[in-house]
Amino acid sequence: DTEVTQTPKHLVMGMTNKKSLKCEQHMGHRAMYWYKQKAKKPPELMFVYSYEKLSINESVPSRFSPECPNSSLLNLHLHALQPEDSALYLCASSQEGTEQFFGPGTRLTVL
Amino acid sequence: SQKIEQNSEALNIQEGKTATLTCNYTNYSPAYLQWYRQDPGRGPVFLLLIRENEKEKRKERLKVTFDTTLKQSLFHITASQPADSATYLCALADNYGQNFVFGPGTRLSVLP
């Protein structure tokens, strides 16, 4: 299985809602990533988990809270988001020092 | 601060020609450089990886070069086809693959 899955595909939420994005991979990769991508821009790295521990947090606001329950799963908990947080959220996984495998993304709209 | 540039935001070429995309970087010493393809509304797909001690890599119609002195990578698609139309992103990473930074991308259009 060489696939990264993400759910949901689309999410619309209000600024007071709490929601979660989910990501799963079964390739045995030990590094997992969250990216944010705005239209016509490259993906921007948000968080990196290595061996289930948060290793990089690129100064992301606390309204985004990552969680890695086990080596195959990665969650991104969302709370009190702003309209400017609307974007495509991408999850990826890799072995260290190799290519990243990306999921299809979750299209998030914050009203 | 680290900066990555790709030669142009958009590139149009005729079918059958070779497309050449450029990636330049400053204030970075990457252990390796990668190229990805991204179609609209989808996640990037890995194409090629080249390490700092390698000069050139090939895969089918794709070729990438890496010059750490010039701080530049060139990405070539030979015998281009309309199906090659997409945004191409270069990405730099350190040895652990964690300090991962994408360039702005080049939107390639191959015209029939």
Image (spheres, coloured by chain):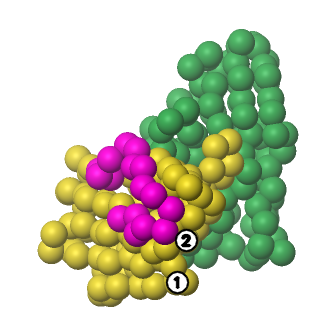
Chain colours: A green, B yellow
The reply to whether residue A33 is in sight is no
Residue in the picture at 49% in, 68% down: B16
Q: Is residue B91 left or right of residue B45?
A: left
Q: Position of residue A63 (x, y in %)?
A: 62, 27
Label 2 with label 1: CB-CB less than 8 Å: yes
**Is the residue marked by circle 1 packed among few (<14), some (14-19), or many (20+) residues within 10 Å?**
few
Question: Left or right of B51: which side holds B26?
Answer: left
Viewer-proximal residue, B38 or A58?
B38
Identify the mark at residue B59; answer none if there is no mark.
1
Amino acid at circle 2: Leu
* Residue that mark 2 sits on: B47
Q: Quadrant of the C terminus of chain B?
A: bottom right
Q: What whole-number distance in Å separates the C-alpha atoms at marks 2 and 1? A: 8 Å
The part of the chain drawn in magenta is: B5-20
- Residue B74 forms part of the magenta stretch: no
Question: Does residue A15 sit above or below A67 in this rendering?
Answer: above
> Which residue sits furthest left?
B69
Amino acid at dot 1: Lys
x 52%, y 83%: residue: B59
The local crowd at label 2, few if under 14, some if 14 to 19, many if 20 or more residues have their Cα within 10 Å, is some
